[in-house]
Image (cartoon, coloured by chain):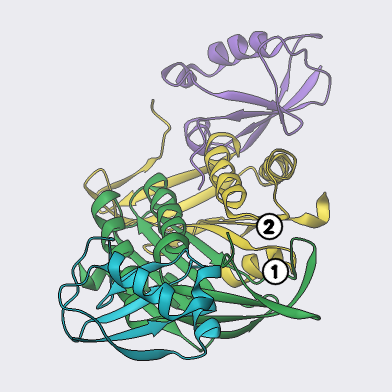
Chain colours: A purple, B cyan, C green, D yellow
Amino acid sequence: MKITLLFFGILKDIIGDTSKELQVTESITVDGLKTHLLQKYKELNNFSTFSIAVNEEYVTANYILNTNDVVALIPPVSGG
Amino acid sequence: MKITLLFFGILKDIIGDTSKELQVTESITVDGLKTHLLQKYKELNNFSTFSIAVNEEYVTANYILNTNDVVALIPPVSGG
Amino acid sequence: MQKNTSIKITSKKLNIQECYDFVQDVSCGGIALFVGTVRNQTQDKAVTLLDFSTYQSMAIKEMQKIADRALTDFHILKIAIHHAEGKLHIGDIPVIIAVSSPHRKAAFAACQFAIDTLKETVPIWKKEYFADGEVWVNAHP
Amino acid sequence: MQKNTSIKITSKKLNIQECYDFVQDVSCGGIALFVGTVRNQTQDKAVTLLDFSTYQSMAIKEMQKIADRALTDFHILKIAIHHAEGKLHIGDIPVIIAVSSPHRKAAFAACQFAIDTLKETVPIWKKEYFADGEVWVNAHP
C-alpha cells in the first residue's frame, strides 16, 4: 500500500527532501516502518531518535498504518 | 518632643485628616505611641490592626521614636 | 542594581510595551509579565470603579526593595514594577510587573515573588466603589 | 472552548498587545504573559539568526490541545498561544503565551504549563546560525 512520508528539521536536511511516497506492506506497524526506513535510508542510522506522527497525530510503536496515511518523521522539537 | 503623624487609606477617612503634629514624651516606643493614639482617637479602637512606618520604613513595636520623626499609620495594604 | 530596575507610580495609564522594552535584553531568552486588571465584580458585587491611594515616597522605596531582592534572589536580568494611582475603571491596569532572564523558570518565579510581595508590603490602598457605596479593600480583617 | 483560545503560527512579527487584548476580560483580575526572545548567544557561541520551521497543520493542532488542556486543568478564562516561523534576529519574539484568570496563581501556572508543554510536543524546529555555521537545536541528544 502507498503512504506519504514527511521530513522535518534535521531529517529534511539528511534526506534532502520534504516528502516522499513509499510502498509498504499491508498492516505494517510504525515500528516495522522504522526498521524499513533505517534500511532504506542508511543516513538515518546516525540519527535514530525521532517520533512518528500519522495524519498529524503522534502515534506509538505498535500503531498499524493504513493506505494513504501521511507519516511524519519528527526529530526532537525545539520551538518556543 | 514633636512628631508628625500620617494617615492613609481607611485611617485617613476615620481620622478625617492626612497628617497631624503631635507632642509625645521623649524615648516613647512605637507600642507606647499606639496606646497613646488609641486613647486620643477613640475611633481607632474599632480598628486596631495597623502597622507603623517611621521615616518611610516599617518598624517593630519596641522601636524608640526621635524628635521630628514622621510616623505613618499603615492600615492593611491592598495594592496590585 | 538601580539601572536594572524600573520603579514607577503614576496617575497616567500604565504601558505594557514600556515595561517590556525596559526589561528586554539581547542576553535574555524569556520575559515573564504579570498585568493586573480591574475586575467587574468582587465577591459577587458589581464594581463601578476603584480608587488607588498611595504613601508614594514609601511605596517607591518598598517597590525598589522588592526589585532589588528579586535581582539578588533569582537569576534574572532586569525587572520593572509599575503601579497606578487614582481612579481606575473596569479593565484598566493597576499594576504591571515584567522580568527578563536567560531562563524562563527564573523569570516566572521572580515575577510571582514580586507581585505576591507587593500585595503584602507596599503601602498602596484600594477603595472599591459599588452602585450603593464604597469600601476600603482588606481594611476589616 | 474554541472562542476562549487564540492559536497562531505566522511569519509576521508577533504582537504582545494582540495577545493581551484577546485574553483580557472584565471578569479577569490578572493576566500572565510569557514572551520568548532570541538571545545573542547559546552556550557561549554568538548567534546571528534563528530559523524556525514548522509542521504547521500539526503544530496548530498540538498548540490547540495545549490551550484546551490549560482551560480544562486550570481555573483560567482565556489563553493565546502565538508562534513565529521563518528567520528571526536577536531580540525578535518566537513565542507569546498570554493567560487571563480571575486569580493570578492560576494564570501563572497555566502560562508555565503552556510554554513547558509547547517546548516538548509542538512540531517546530529551530536552526541556529553562527558566524561559522549552523545547527539544528536539540537534534543531537
Q: Quadrant of residue D109?
A: top right
Type of residue at label 2? Pro
Asked if B28 appears above or below B41 in the picture, the reply is: above
Provide the chain ID for the residue under circle 2: D
Q: Residues within 10 Å of mark 2 (few under 14, many from 20)?
A: some
Task: From the image, tell me which residue sits under label 1.
Answer: C39
Of the 4 image quadrants, the one containing the C terminus of chain C is bottom right
Which chain contains the residue that carries disc 1?
Answer: C
Percent x, y of residue D5? 74, 54
Marks 1 & 2, CB-CB < 8 Å contact: yes
Location of residue B44 in the rendering, given as x and y in whole percent from the top left corner:
50, 74
* The quarter of the displayed image where residue C9 is located: bottom left
- Real-space CA distance between mark 1 and mark 2, rounded to the nearest whole angstrom: 8 Å
Q: Secondary structure at mark 2?
A: loop
Q: Position of residue D128 (x, y in %)?
A: 38, 48
Could you tell me residue A28's position as x and y percent?
Answer: 75, 9
Residue D102 image label: 2
Residue D121 sits above or below residue B65 on the image: above
**Callout 1 and callout 2 share a chain:** no
Residue found 15% across the figure and 78% down from its top: B26
Instruction: Tell me if residue C16 can be seen.
Output: no
Which image quadrant is residue D26 in? Answer: bottom right
Badge 1: how crowded within 10 Å, few (<14), some, or many (20+)? many
Q: Is residue C50 visible?
A: yes
